[in-house]
Amino acid sequence: MCGRFVRYSSIQDILTEFDVEGPAVDLPPSYNVAPSHEVVSIINDGKKRIVLCKWGYIPSWAKDPATGYKMINARAESVGDKPSFKYAFTHTRILVVANGFYEWHTQGKVKIPVFIQLKTGRPFGFAGLLSIWTSPGGKQVHTCTVITTNANKLLAPVHDRMPVIIHKKDEDLWLDPANQDKQFLTSLLRPYAHEEMKFYHVSALVNSPSNNSPDCIRPVDSPG
């Protein structure tokens, strides 16, 4: 699964990296993004643009917003057929912008956090889905989920799942609203090339979402 990630690139750097025109929104960097937090995402709804959404997908038909806490991730193997995600998979796909993500692996009784990123350190896009939920009071809330797949060779010893990172060359294909071929879209949901990624141990600071500073991604010699 993917339960915590990092986005430290500035909005201006994101505009450049993803070839997006200037946004009307902004969001400070976060070194410990957790479920229910706002995230920076990219959508193409006729124009490629940045949108802010809350991490934790609330289907349009849901009565209780707490549903979102159970739907921070969607599995690549079934996302195109699940009733909750089926419409979004063909109509409202997004890229959730990140610079890396955390995972925890177990050694004995200890869970050790690691930080995982591209070797380049550049921002990338998780495969995500957007849902616009309307509260009982009539307020529209943008929410999202991150799609996961089997871990690649690098990450398999740490965890059996990883978030889908859409390759740079496939980003526009993923975002294209005219592309509704489920078989093709599913083919993009594959483990990212292990040789282009790296990870290292970080401190237990990341265990609490209240800790949000560059210290969260600082390498440590002693795990935990």
Image (cartoon, rainbow, N blue to C red):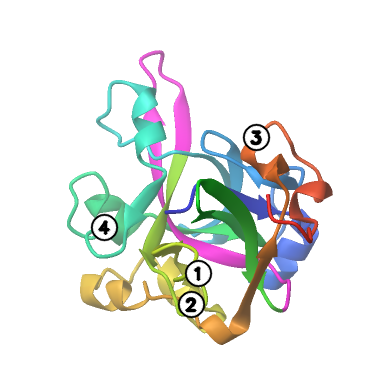
Closest to the camera, between mark 3 and mark 2, is 3
Question: Residue tagged by mark 2?
Answer: 192
Cα separation between marks 2 and 1: 6 Å
Badge 4 element: loop
SS state under label 1 = strand
- Nearer the observer, disc 3 or disc 1? 3
- Please name the residue shown 63% across and 58% down the image: 114
> Going by the image, does 51 lie left or right of 156?
right
Q: Nearer the viewer, residue 65 or 16?
A: 65
- Residue at 53% across, 81% down: 194
Q: Do the residues under discs 2 and 4 have CB atoms within 8 angstroms?
A: no
Q: Which mark is residue 208?
A: 3
Q: Quadrant of the N terminus?
A: bottom left
Residue highlighted by disc 4: 79
Q: Is residue 160 magenta?
A: no
Compared across the picture, whether 171 is left or right of 212 comes to left
Q: Which one is earlier in the sequence, the residue at label 2 or at label 1?
A: 1
Looking at marks 4 and 1 on the same chain, the residue that comes earlier in the sequence is marked by 4
Earlier in the chain: of badge 3 and badge 1, it is 1
* Disc 2 residue type (three-letter): Tyr
**Tag 4: amino acid:** Val
Q: CA distance from mark 3 to mark 1?
A: 25 Å
Please report whichever mark, 3 or 2, sits nearer to the chain's N-terminal start: 2
Where residue 136 sits, quadrant-wise, is top left
Instruction: Give the spatial CA distance, label 3 vs label 4.
Output: 29 Å
Mark 2 and mark 4: Cα distance apart in space: 18 Å
Q: Which residue is mark 1?
A: 165
**Image location (x, y in percent) of residue 62:** 27, 28
